[in-house]
Image: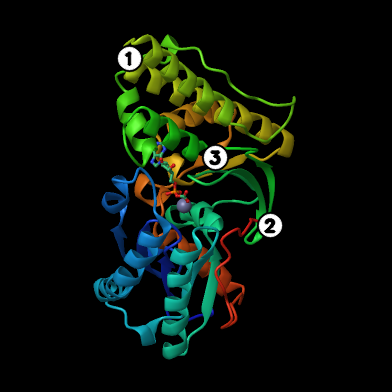
Amino acid sequence: MDMSAHRPVFILGIETSCDETAAAVLKDGRELLSQSIASQVATHQKYGGVVPEIASREHSSHLPSVVERTLREAQVGFCDLAAIAVTYGPGLVGPLLVGVAGAKAMAYAAGIPLIGVNHLEGHIYANFLAQPAIPFPFLALLVSGGHTNFVYFEGHGAYRVIGRTRDDAAGEALDKVARALGLGYPGGPLIQELARSGDPKSFELPRAMLEPGSLDFSFSGMKSAVLNILNTAAMRGEQLDQADLAAAFQQAVIEVLVRKTLVALEQTGAKTLLLAGGVAANDLLRETLALELAQRGISFYYPPPALCTDNGAMIATAGYYHYRRGNFAPWTLNAVPGLQLS
Ligand code: KG4
Ligand code: ZN
């Protein structure tokens, strides 16, 4: 903590990269004063996925009231804020632009700095909200709807990506299989629920480990295997046990994630793992990792489920660490839909 700062540091975080309009007020990087989320899940559910144009419009109509409510609940005014942190990528360009333009206007009018936050960094920083004293270096496993990465952190803002998916992200594969099973969107939580009553051993699915020692992922093969099983059954007019298939697929995804994590820990020598991203909300993934890591003396951190999926608190937390480094964005900050972690 920077003890020289007598005034509390209030950061407003804003997140609009996909289908949640979210904001949060964070005090001194560790105290979440308030947060609100206007979810568009119900709107997009009938299309089976996020419709970008509709998402942009919903963000525009919800952002002002979400921010107002968040500040009111925190009992913090614009003039009390130290900075406004906003997601500027990666994500959908229209939704990102709504957040970036809104944050810019608010920060400029309040005369306070603007901070641009990489959404993926935000996911990982959700861990620092619960546990500000996480020791460096650590390995992060980021598993979201759009990304599956291993990120090696040496310090705040000092990180490199050491593994990535070559095709589908883990969450994307779960969402696609859920859609094929007719479960709806988003698929991860629905598969998790259905899998509870299924037997993961009832279907044999491939586990793509790639070349020995590779820290990259490939989930499209196991996803296609499920789609083939479903198509074959439909052609033959056979009934499948959907819970069994959901359980087998979830098991296959988790097994690859866990086995690769153990390889990545061994290669980097890291003694600490941080789990992050929407798929990090998955019970079985958390439990399996916890078991394997405890056996190896590796410290394991993961955020509470509500902070795994997209939220404003994670953006405010990442923003706080940028603030401490004086890392502010210019007024020309733009949305970068394909922003990478680098
Ligand atoms: O991080 P996130 O909220 O948005 C992105 O940045 O992509 O992640 C959303 C992804 C979706 O694919 C969703 O199906 C998955 O996270 N997800 C889950 C669970 N909750 C959300 N996957 C497995 N189990 C869950 N409980
Ligand atoms: Zn996300």
* Pointer 2 residue Cβ closer than 8 Å to ligand 1: no
Residue at image mark 3: 169
**Residue contact between numbered discs 2 and 1, judged by CB atoms under 8 Å:** no
Residue at image mark 2: 342
- Is 170 displayed left or right of 62 in the figure? right
- The disc label shown at residue 241, or none: 1
Mark 3 vs mark 1, CA separation in Å: 25 Å
* Pointer 3 residue Cβ closer than 8 Å to ligand 1: yes
Q: Estimate how packed mark 3 is, as few (under 14), some (14 to 19) or many (20 or more) residues with alpha carbons within 10 Å.
A: many
- Which secondary structure lies at badge 1? loop
The percent position of residue 305, horizontal first and vertical second, equals 37, 45
- Which secondary structure lies at badge 2? loop
Lower position in the chain sequence, tag 3 or tag 1: 3
- Which secondary structure lies at badge 3? loop
Residue 212 position by quadrant: top right
Mark 2 vs mark 1, CA separation in Å: 43 Å
Residue 147 position by quadrant: top right
What amino acid type should be assigned to the residue bearing mark 1? Answer: Asp
